[in-house]
Amino acid sequence: MSFVRILPAALAAAVAFGLGTAMAQAPGQSAAAAPKRLADGVTLKAIRDRGSLVCGVSEGLAGFSAKGDGGAWTGFDVDFCRALAAAIFDDPAKVRYVPLNADKRFDALRGGEIDILSRNSTWTLAREASLGIVFPAVTYYDGQGFMVRKSQPAESPLAFDGLKVCAQSGTTNASNAADYFKANDVKATMVVATSIREAVDAYEGGRCDAITSDVSQLHAERAGLGKPVDHVILPDVISKEPLGPAVRQGDDGFALLVKWVHFAMVNAEELGVTAQTLDRAQKSEKPEIRRLVGTDGDLGTRLGLTNDWVMRVVRHVGNYGEVFERNVGVATKLGIPRGLNHLWTTGGIQYAPPLQ
């Protein structure tokens, strides 16, 4: 399935999500009551009392969440937690990162070991309905693909008859691939590993002919192989993988805050507000920019924050486009084109409701 075929449904979902947000305040509800309710939410209060955000991340995925030699965490998913900390504390360093494998990540969130999971996780109905978690936003539109050696004659997963395909347990990848092969009568054998490292090692060691995962993860893993140029990511995309942060159900205020931090970063990019243009943005006469940076209105206090919360995020971390390009974009080692993650104004489906 191509990304182009995914676009209409995903865009419709994004628009519907925004409309749902706009309808969240019931008729007659006082706007003045909202700031106290959100500020006093259990999760946000615990974060403030602790003095830091606890963020669940991967055990090491280049470009998304990886710990450097000096002990500092970097990556696309890491930057979202930094942005949230910046909005709350005006300090993106007030985050403690907890590396989690795929099997343990949701248990850690449900059990209160972490405040938020920002770990290349797919938003699905089953996860929300049965795990007691909620995905407030899609920060990265992805899809599942396959990587093979260039020497492999199969140019499509439809030609994988007789091949062994590695996948990681605890993810949607193994079941998606099995469903795809069954639907297309492809006689491939799934080899399920307990971790992505084990799956990659099996592939690189020749115990698998192909490896399947989200396309973004395949880019990251290929970059770490001994000879990345000897491997190719096939163009076939077999699933929708909307990736984003997850939080516990039952604290609507914190979920709302997480959602709007993402939307604010998208809106900042759309309005041309970057870390370098913040001073100019503060002097802007455009109403949408004045609301974004907090010059007008009280949108920040409605979230339990200061009204300059978006300025804090952009100053310390950047807008959505800056974060994408810095961590995983075409100029990085991963070299991932933005594709669907372009703004809706430039052919993608990253779309945020207005800040008003």
Image: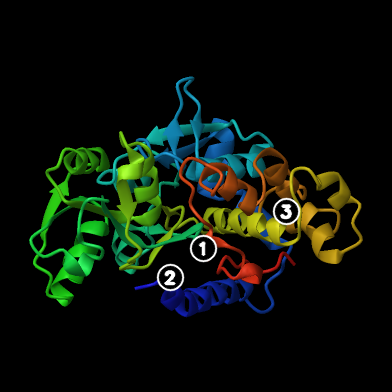
Relative to residue 30, is residue 113 depicted above or below? above
The kind of residue on which mark 3 rests is: Gly
Q: Secondary structure at mark 1?
A: helix
Which quadrant of the rendered structure holds the N terminus? Answer: bottom left
The kind of residue on which mark 2 rests is: Phe
Q: Which residue is mark 1?
A: 339
Separation of residues labelled 1 and 3 (CA atoms) = 31 Å
Residue 111 seen anywhere in this rendered image of the structure: no
Q: Which residue is mark 2?
A: 3
Q: Position of residue 40 (x, y in %)?
A: 60, 49
What residue is shown at x 48% (from left), y 45% (from top)?
77
Query: Closer to the camera: disc 1 or disc 3?
Result: 1
Q: Position of residue 281 (x, y in %)?
A: 84, 52
Separation of residues labelled 2 and 1 (CA atoms) = 8 Å
Q: Which residue is mark 3?
A: 300
Q: Position of residue 325 (x, y in %)?
A: 58, 48
